[in-house]
Amino acid sequence: MEFGCVIIINSVLLLLVSYSDNHEIKIKDYSDLVSDIYLDSMQLISKSKYPVEKHFVTTEDGYVLTLFRIPGQGPPVLLVHGIGDSSDSWLVLGPSNSLAYRLSDDHFDVWLFNSRGNKYSKKHINKISQKKYWDFSFEEMGSKDLPATIDYILSKTSQSKLSYVGFSQGTTIFFVLCSMRPSYNDKIKQAILLAPVATINNIQSPLIPFYANIYDKLTFLAEAGINEVFSSNVFVSTYHAKVCNLRSPLRFFCGLEYYLNFGLKELERLPDARLPIISSHIPAGGSAKTFLHFLQGYVLKSFRRYNYGVKKNKEVYNSSTPPVYNLSAVSAPVTLVVSESDWISTIKDAKLIQNNLKNVVRHIVINTTLDFTHLEFVYGERVNSVINDPILKFMKSL
């Protein structure tokens, strides 16, 4: 039954894109922005007339990551994207509203992270099988990608610390980093964690219980060879760009997708003129194992290392169950920013995180009257007043 639903949904998407092929991509009164749909991070930055550099970082296990830099004279800050996303997320709202540009305008040295497996970081120094390449979850992003990235930035800038801004999965891998490799706590000047995700016991998305009910089947499919999910490709980008715009007769389906996945109640909460640009840059790719690792947190009601099953757990961890990540080892100064209207990073789960951290310097709660949902932390119409302005004020005060 569940797989029948997936087939039906995929068939509907195919029909939608086929139908929308007859409708030119147009953005009301903003035709000069249409080209942004097809631009990568470096091109977006260049078009906005900011200086830009591309850097490559090799992790200890051979993955090659791409970093983008908007160089500045001030202290370095690392921006870390959410699940299935990329550095694009900090750029697609344009110079007036994207955090990367706002930080650059205030002279920060801005570095944009791309985790292994997304469209910018799909290389490896060795010729390895697809199955071996995709055998990673958010743990490797935190324990291997972030250390390599942080060390590279500190070396390039001759600094001993950097500031860290993470959204959603970007907060998860920060917790992994500082708990599994605690020496990196001393390399973090401050960490601003937007919509933090570790335990997801109280997640409100209607899709997560559905996926949890078929968790064993999904795990089987991943082990059988479904390695990549949320892939970035022309089909998905075309669908989103054509359906998620003001003139699309199928705009409802865009709203439905964002509501079911992220709790976004109205598409108008995202900037209308930028909506096709936002949506065409999502998703950017990731591993099935990463998705399953997050889902595992809901199933097991705890923030643990990846569950391989009793036999392999004993081989890998010397325990029948995967160890819990030790959040009390996170000693870097942390600011938690949560919203009462967020389905993914809930107030209850954020409180569980706060109770286990040693050095929470700020815990900011966005009141339910604003009805500020998960995607809005990065892509929202109100992102400047609710998120960016307070971040900049805090960072400039240090």
Image (cartoon, rainbow, N blue to C red):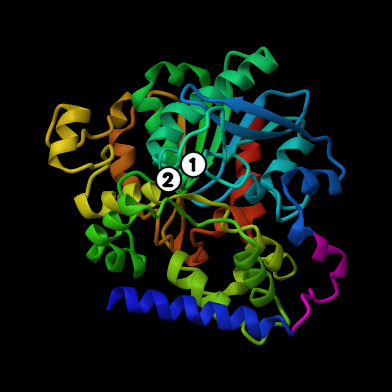
Q: Is residue 361 visible?
A: no
In the drawing, what numbered circle is on residue 269?
A: none
Local secondary structure at mark 1: helix
Is residue 189 depicted above or below 176 in this figure? above
The residue identified by callout 1 is: 170
Q: Is residue 340 magenta?
A: no
Which residue does the image show at 30% across and 46% down from the upper left? Answer: 199
Which residue does the image show at 51% across and 32% down from the upper left? Answer: 191
Where residue 6 appears, as percent x and y from the top left, is 39, 74
Quadrant of the drawing holding the C terminus = top right
Res 141 quadrant in image: top left
Amino acid at pointer 1 = Gly
For disc 1, the neighbor class at 10 Å (few under 14, some 14 to 19, many from 20) is: many
The magenta region covers 23-35
The residue identified by callout 2 is: 196
Quadrant of the drawing holding the N terminus = bottom left
Nearer-N-terminus badge (1/2):
1
For disc 2, the neighbor class at 10 Å (few under 14, some 14 to 19, many from 20) is: many
The foreground one among 13 and 203 is: 13
Q: Horizontal placement of 202 versus 194: left or right?
A: left
Amino acid at pointer 2 = Pro
Where residue 271 appears, as percent x and y from the top left, is 69, 66
Is residue 11 depicted above or below 223 in this figure? below
The foreground one among 14 and 111 is: 14
Where residue 156 appears, as percent x and y from the top left, is 68, 17
